[in-house]
Image (spheres, coloured by chain):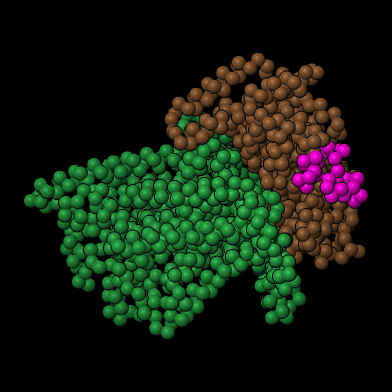
Amino acid sequence: MTTFRRGAFTRCGCLLLAATLGVALLTRLSRGATVEDVALMKSAERQKILVEGAKKEGKVSFYTGLIVDQVVRPLKEGFEKEYPFLQVDFFRGNSENIARRVLAEYQAKRYDVDVVSGSAATSMVQRAGFMQRFYSPHLAEYPAELKDSKGFWGSTNVYFMTLGYNTRNVKANELPKSYEDLLNPRWKGQMMWSTSRGSGAPQFIGNILLTMGQEAGKAYLQKLKGQNIAKSTASARQILDLVIAGEYPLAVQIFNHHAYISKAAGAPVEWQPLEPVTATINTIGLAKNSPRPHAAMLFLDFVLSKKGQKIVQTSNYLPSHPEIPALQADLKPGGGRFKKVNYINPDVLYDQGNEWVDYFQSQFLK
Amino acid sequence: MAKQQSSETYNFPLKSQPAPQARGIFSLSMATRFDAQTCVLLIVSVITAYLVLPPLYSVLQTSLFTTKLTGELDEFTFRYYQELFRELQVLGPFLNTVYFSIGSALFATIIGAVVAWIVTRTDTPLRGLGYFTAFASFGTPFILYTIGWLLLLGKAGPVNYWLRTFLNQSEPVLNVYSLWGMVLIESFLWSPFVFLMIAASFRSMDPSLEEASAACGARLWQTLQRVSLRLMLPAFFSVVLLIFIRSFESFEIPALVGLPGDIRVLTTSIYLDSQRMPPTYGRAGAFSVLLMLVVAGALYLYFHVTREGERFHTVTGKGYRPTLIQLGSWRYVTAALLLVYSFVLLVLPFLIVLWASLLPFYMQPSFEAFSLFTLKNFVTAIHFPKITDSIKNSVLLGLGSASVVMLLTTFASWILVRTKLRGRWLLDLLTTLPLLFPGIVMGLAIMRFYLIVPIPIYGTLWILLVAFITRYIPYGIRYTHAGLLQLHRELEEAAYTSGASWSNAMRRVTLPLLTPSFLGGWVFVFLLSAKELSMSILLVSPQTPVVSVAIFELWENGQVGELAAFGVIWTLILVSVAIIYYLIARRYGVQQH
């Protein structure tokens, strides 16, 4: 495929696409096992068969929302060292863009992607019917909330959403320690949050409604509405920067590791968990018509294994694997600063997210 | 006065049928010219239609159909239009949008036009600063630019700090999260565009008309008002139209600046709609279709106003190089204005970015911050993966799209201005439409189109080039159209009567005279394409990284300092390319005359 692309770049012939489609079709026919067979294989020979098949495939195409510089590149290097005959090609985008790209490619019957990863991407692609269930021996090591009960996705890493505050503007004794504390008149007009569905106000609302129940949750949110939290379409990270610059003392729903990174650089910022803490899962799964299923399965195995999770850890991300702690251990639950976590399942986010967005728009927007 | 007479007598036979005795000579040249005209019309129309119609079709479809989870079309519906009209009935957001767009269009035009006048028409010292500021202010990454202004004017920012100390207030004096904050930042963003456009128009001003006005005893201001500004109506219409539309449909500034202060505009809910799953763009599509109707109306009017093209001719057979207005001691005032403009538009934002790039995390300017200065961000930025590839690709794309857009739109404008073909205003509409396509819908449309048609450019730089050209045709057409309206037909006619072929006349007369507009547009498209994000993010492949996407990734990375460092490097590269090009081109242009 790589050579095809380079060729297309310099030449410009109309037959090339037809030719690739033909080649793709031929390789699909000549390969005996279907993608499903490979994905769900559990035999004792599994590893051997995968390696044999992968040697013919030569590469993996990985569409991901993870940051290339920070974690994709180390994972690629680790994997290519383990399987020198394979190469990882990646496309990076946010969940929506990954989903759009996969959907558009599948509609045009152009099957290039093998592995899809992102916070909401796998759910979106799966709803369209373009994901494949898979089995990996490592999935057994993960708790139920960090893998799909139907087998469509596993998890690479997790994010925890907490308060972030400017240590110069918020004194230790007035720091909110619970959701109730946010209702203190002291914070009226002093807080900011993002409008983002996946990491902002709608997600916060979802967490409240899921954990407090509809009635109590809505009663709480009505009181919170009176606090006039400033809204911004900026990302959680940008909002934290505004807090560091002193524009607002408190940010609601930011990534705790962002606050940690800035604090380590000397910024006057700290994070504070409100329990239960909202957690987002970064998922990973196999595309339905993966053209290189053997290599794709080896890659999935690698990322979910302790070895792969160690790479996630050393990249300063928060590994999903329960036995691999974060480099800065207290960023994960059980690290000493918080215990109660609400892992928001991507399917729940997909199904109920619109309600949360609607609630936010109708109640919190003027 | 003598000039006007001469041009009338000269023009007369050309407007009417050629005199019978001259028919023999004329019919030959008319025939070849007619062929050339038809050819150009055909080629330009086909290319433009090829570029514009697929996304247009896609926008219409998006607004009229619901989509399935797979992205396929589902049911026909008017729902999105109904929702839009319901939204329009709520007065608040609608009025905010109108105030915001009119305010930005007027304010940006005033700033840009005043600076353009100072730079091109007066003997003010430091005039080169105007161009430099315009180029350099484009280089700053958009997000950084907006956030920079927020930090500068925000509650904890230095401006409020000084005002508070000065006025002895305990609360912040200015609230940037307001309508005026939005207008201010949007206007600053657009004023370089106004400057480039109006400056091109001023450079082609006919001094004899102004001299005539002065000879009749008009003061400088009266001359400006009654002669210069009226002659520049096409240029002014273009900038006001473009900025008004862009502000009307923009959501970035209203969202980042307005939303925290609870200022809602029409696009706010459209933007928040895209947070739903599966994402639908129906309302965004309906919104842009509605805008298209409004713009079609505006263009139709504009077309009628400028139909009597002779009224705007300033470049005629007589010497046309405008003389500089001697301002006397006033030139120090204008120089001061120029300095303020450069400071606000260039130095201030650049300083904020530079400041952020030298710090491990962003903090407001203070002495404490100096002790934290570090070059670490620059080291990281230089080692950003594929940075050289990104820069190379972005520069290539900028050069390619600027050149193709300007060539294409020069010919399109020539058809619009010089020929009498019926329905040619439709070509104007066609070339303006891409302005109204929502970036994401257009990106998707282009992606789908090239996944389906057997032209193998998906995943290569070519698809980005096609997308950029389509996106920036509207800007090119406004530059060249306004520029061409200023050129008197007699110059081309003179070439034809001297036996020049159409292509010869075009190459040796029209194009060289159009240089100021052409260059202004070229630089603008070049700089704009270097910033394009909403389509690039969908269309890039791992083999074709571009700078704007790299910047976006750095931003998502959350490292403001690294992003700022990258921004500083990129600004310097962009400015050098723009300046080198401009110097070479200007020298070339001057020799032509």
Q: Is residue B539 magenta?
A: no
Q: Nearer the viewer, residue B157 or B298?
A: B157
State the residue in front, B478 or A120: A120
Residue A97 falls left or right of residue A350: left
Q: Quadrant of the N terminus of chain B?
A: bottom left
The hue used for chain B is: green
Number of labels in the image equals: 0
Q: Which of the 4 image quarters holds residue B261?
A: bottom right
Q: Residue at coordinates 24% horizontally, 50% vertically from top-left?
A: B504
Q: Residue furthest bottom?
A: B329
- Residue B173 in picture, x, y percent from top left: 69, 73
**Chain letter, colour brown:** A
Where does residue A45 sit, x and y in percent of width and height?
78, 18
Give the overall secondary structure of the magenta segment: loop
Q: Above or below — where is B303 with respect to A110?
A: below
* Residue extent of the magenta highlight: A310-337
Is B185 placed left or right of B40 in the picture? right
Which quarter shows the C terminus of chain B?
bottom left
**Residue A352 visible from this viewpoint:** no
Q: Quadrant of residue B126?
A: bottom left
Q: Position of residue B84 (x, y in %)?
A: 59, 46
Asked if residue A333 is among those painted magenta in the image, a careful observer would answer yes
- Residue drawn at point x = 40 percent, y = 47 percent: B404
Residue B319 in view: yes
Q: Nearer the viewer, residue B563 or B284?
A: B563
